[in-house]
Amino acid sequence: MNGTAALLLALTAVVAVGDWMVVAGKNKRLEYILKPLTTIGLVAVAVAIEPRDPAARVLFVIALTLSLAGDVLLMLPNRKRFFAFGLASFLLAHLAYIPGLLLLGASAGGLIVGFVVALVGGAIVGRRVLAGVGRTQPALTVPVTVYLTVILAMAVVAWGTLLPFAIAGAVIFCVSDAVLASNEFVKPWPRAGVVVMVTYHVAQALLVLSLVSW
C-alpha cells in the first residue's frame, strides 16, 4: 500500500471511530456528517491504492458509492419509509462486489467452503430474520429474501478468492446485516446501532484492502 492510501485509511479510521462514538451518544446531527464521510473516505482509499486488478477496483468503487447512497437513505428521519430504497442500494452494491471479487480469483475449493458456510448461516440466521419480517413487515419479505440471497452469494465469492481480507470483510458484512435485520425485525438489540456501524465499517475497509497485492 502506498503512502497516500495509508494516510487516507488512517484518516478514515479516525472519522469512523468518531461516527461510532456519536452513534453511541445518539447525536444524529453529527452522524449525518460522519457516517457518509467514512464511506467517502473508503472510496478515496480504493482510488488511491495500487490494486492487484484495476477492473476490480472500479467495481469496488461502484459498490462503495452505492453503499454511500444506502448510508444516506437509512439515516433519513423517516427511516421506515426509505428502508426498501436503502436495501436496494446495498443489494446493488453487493451485485457490484460479486464480479469485482471474481476478478480477484475464483478457487473451486474456496467457493465450496463458502457455499457451505453461507448455507449454514442462512439456515440459522436467515430463517429467523425472514420469520420476523413476515410478522412485522410482510411487504418486505420478498425484497429481504432477495437481499439475503445476494449478500450470501457475495460471501461465497469472497471465500472463492482465498484472500483473507476479502473473506473476513464479507463475513463481517454478513454479521453486520444480521444484527441490523435482527434488531429491525426480530427483537431490539442493546447497542445494536454501534455494533452495526463498527462491523459495517470494518467489513468495507477489509474488502477495500483485499484489492491490495501485499
Image: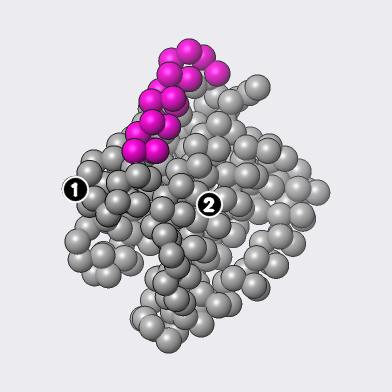
- The local crowd at label 2, few if under 14, some if 14 to 19, many if 20 or more residues have their Cα within 10 Å, is many
Q: Magenta span has 8? A: yes
The C terminus: image quadrant: top right
Regarding residue 100, the answer to whether it shows in the image is: no
Residue 145 magenta: no
> Which is nearer the N-term, disc 1 or disc 2?
1
What residue is rendered at 45% in x and 76% in y? Answer: 187
Residue at image coords 55%, 65%: 149
Residue 188 percent location from the top left of the image: 42, 72
Q: Position of residue 153 (x, y in %)?
A: 60, 57
Point out the image quarter for the N terminus. Answer: top right
Q: Residue at x 80, y 49 (%)?
A: 109
Residue at screen point 31% across, 65% down: 83
Q: Which mark is residue 37?
A: none
Q: Is residue 207 above or below residue 114?
A: above
Where does the image place residue 138, in percent across and percent down from the top left?
39, 83
- Amino acid under disc 1: Arg
Task: Name the dominant secondary structure of the magenta segment.
Answer: helix
In the image, 147 versus 206, the foreground residue is 206
Residue that carries the numbered disc 1 in the rendered image: 29
Identify whether 139 is placed above or below 91. Answer: below
Which structural element holds mark 2? helix
Q: Identify the residue under disc 2.
A: 173
Task: Give the secondary structure at mark 1.
Answer: helix
Farthest-out residue, bottom: 135
Disc number lying in front (1 or 2) = 1
Q: Which residues are magenta?
A: 1-18
Amino acid at dot 2:
Phe
Task: Calculate the distance from the C-alpha at mark 1 to the C-alpha at mark 2.
Answer: 25 Å
